[in-house]
């Protein structure tokens, strides 16, 4: 069976016509995006692209921080839980031991509770930014349609 992954040396052209979606980023768990910058991009199209890039970068940074925090807090929880049991978080061969489903459910519940305000603020800002992209997107789309009709 052939390997379905594209070679790592494939890169988007200098002036791609469409956005390129890349592999998942290890920190944010979001796919990297190379935003298209057409050669004959109008000021309105450039402003819209920049808004999309800023929104993507803000989202990427948030999830990179949030995921880093999640991993750190989870590791501390696992170590503390095993310590309370008088056990090590690793077995004799150095492999990490797993907590029970119930213990992990407690962690997830507590993590979501402790981060509720942060996630609420994130959701509010995410909606604000994405709704803010609607009008510029509509204007760019109308401009493109009109250009095609005029030709």
Image (cartoon, rainbow, N blue to C red):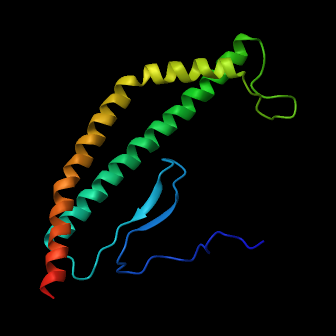
Q: Please identify the quadrant where the C terminus is shown.
A: bottom left
Report the residue at 50% width, 38% height from top.
67
Residue located farthest toward the bottom when viewing the structure as drawn: 151
Outermost residue to the right: 92
**Residue at the (18%, 67%) spot, across then down:** 140
> Where is residue 149 drawn, in percent x and y?
15, 82
Say above or below: 149 vs 55: below
Say above or below: 143 vs 93: below
Relative to 7, say whether 85 is above or below. Answer: above
Please give the count of numbered marks on the rendered protein: 0
Q: Nearer the viewer, residue 49 or 66?
A: 49
Q: As rendered, which of 82 and 40 lies closer to the eye?
A: 40
In the image, taking residue 49 as reference, residue 62 lies left or right, namely right
Q: Position of residue 1 (x, y in %)?
A: 78, 71
Q: Residue at x 21, y 82 (%)?
A: 40
Give how far across and how far down residue 150 sits, in percent: 12, 85
**Which residue is rendered at x = 44% and y = 40% of the image?**
65
Residue 85 in percent (x, y) is at 75, 11
Position of 4 with respect to 30 (left or right) is: right
Q: Is residue 89 above or below residue 53?
A: above
Relative side of 136 to 65, left or right:
left
Instruction: Say which of 103 and 141 sits in front.
Output: 141
Q: Quadrant of residue 127?
A: top left
């Amino acid at each position: 069976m052939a390997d379905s992954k594209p070679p790592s040396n494939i890169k988007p052209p200098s002036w791609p016509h469409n956005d390129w979606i890349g592999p998942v980023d290890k920190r944010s768990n979001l796919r990297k995006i190379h935003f298209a910058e057409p050669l004959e991009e109008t000021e309105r199209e450039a402003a819209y692209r920049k808004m999309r890039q800023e929104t993507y970068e803000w989202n990427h940074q948030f999830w990179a921080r949030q995921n880093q925090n999640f991993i750190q807090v989870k590791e501390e929880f696992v170590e503390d839980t095993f310590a309370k049991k008088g056990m090590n978080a690793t077995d004799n061969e150095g492999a990490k031991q797993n907590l029970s489903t119930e213990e992990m459910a407690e962690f997830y519940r507590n993590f979501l509770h402790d981060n509720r305000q942060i996630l609420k603020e994130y959701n509010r800002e995410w909606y604000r930014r994405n709704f803010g992209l609607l009008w510029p997107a509509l204007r760019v789309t109308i401009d493109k349609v009109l250009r095609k009709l005029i030709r």
